[in-house]
Amino acid sequence: MDPELELLRSWQGGDDRAGNQLFERHFDAIYRFFYGKVEDALAEELAQDTFLSVVQHRDGLHEHRSVRAYLFAVARNKLYDLLRRRGRAARPVDLSECSLEDLGPTPTGLLSRQRQERILLQALRGLPVELQVLMELRYFEGLRGPQLAETLEVPEGTVRSRLRRAHRLLRERLERLADSSEQVESTMSGLEDWARVVRERVEVG
């Protein structure tokens, strides 16, 4: 068994030390998941709520083999619930088609980044929410096929087809936003490197 799964079960059983270990290991990654999608203060609140839900709802762990994938699955559900609540007053929100750009203004924390980083984040923000989440989990957090499938609760074949669509739409977005075709190519060919730069800039608080 994954040692982290043992830690999680110990935490759910009342061992606060186990909970502290998991919190320290994964909080920054869960915070990054929300960063740029909601206001900065709300990102931290949602990250904390994610951990609270994990310890309160023990049955949810049953089908998961990875704590990391489980945490991102809970975080994804919290984000989707929030976006659907915000959009419900105006119209139903289809997160397979609707982007964060459609749903509201860009959080202020994204405005001061270097231009190419900002263009990448803006391009990601224009993707349908489901595809933005997929791309960020793949490139920002390094999740691969099985973990992505587990987190998103879809077959691996669906993950692969969504990644192809996400890459195509991201390129189209970059072509509209970038200063040159060279900038598009350097961003697309170096997605993991750019994602690492952005990832290192995102700090809690």
Image (tube, rainbow, N blue to C red):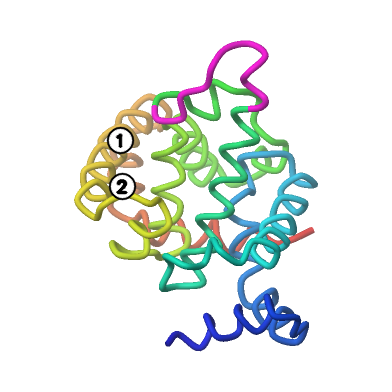
Q: Which image quarter: residue 203?
A: bottom right
Report the number of discs. 2
Sequence order check, earlier mark of 2 and 1: 1
- Say which amino acid is labelled 2: Met
Report the span colored magenta.
Answer: 85-96
Q: Residue at x 50, y 55 (%)?
A: 73
* Residue 121 vertical placement versus 20 (above, below): above
Tell me the quarter of the image containing the N terminus: bottom left
Q: Position of residue 13 (x, y in %)?
A: 69, 80
Q: Which residue is mark 2?
A: 188
Question: Which residue does the numbered mark 1 point to in the structure image?
Answer: 171
Q: Mark 2, residues whose alpha carbon is within 10 Å: few (<14), some, or many (≥20)?
A: some
Mark pair 2, 1: CA separation: 7 Å
Secondary structure at badge 2 equals helix
Determine crowd level at label 1: few under 14, some 14-19, many 20+ residues with C-alpha closer than 10 A. some
Given the image, on which type of amino acid does mark 1 rest? Arg
Identify the residue at horizontal 63%, vertical 11% (top origin).
90
Nearer to me, 16 or 196:
16
114 vs 20: above or below? above
Residue 15, numbered label? none
Residue at 74%, 85% (x, y): give it.
15
Q: Main secondary structure of the magenta part?
A: loop
Which of these two is toward me, 70 or 122?
70
Are discs 2 and 1 less than 8 Å apart at CB? yes
Q: Tell me the quadrant of the picture where the C terminus can be found.
A: bottom right
Vertical arrangement, residue 28 with respect to residue 113, above or below: below
Q: In the picture provided, is 1 more to the left or to the right than 81?
A: left
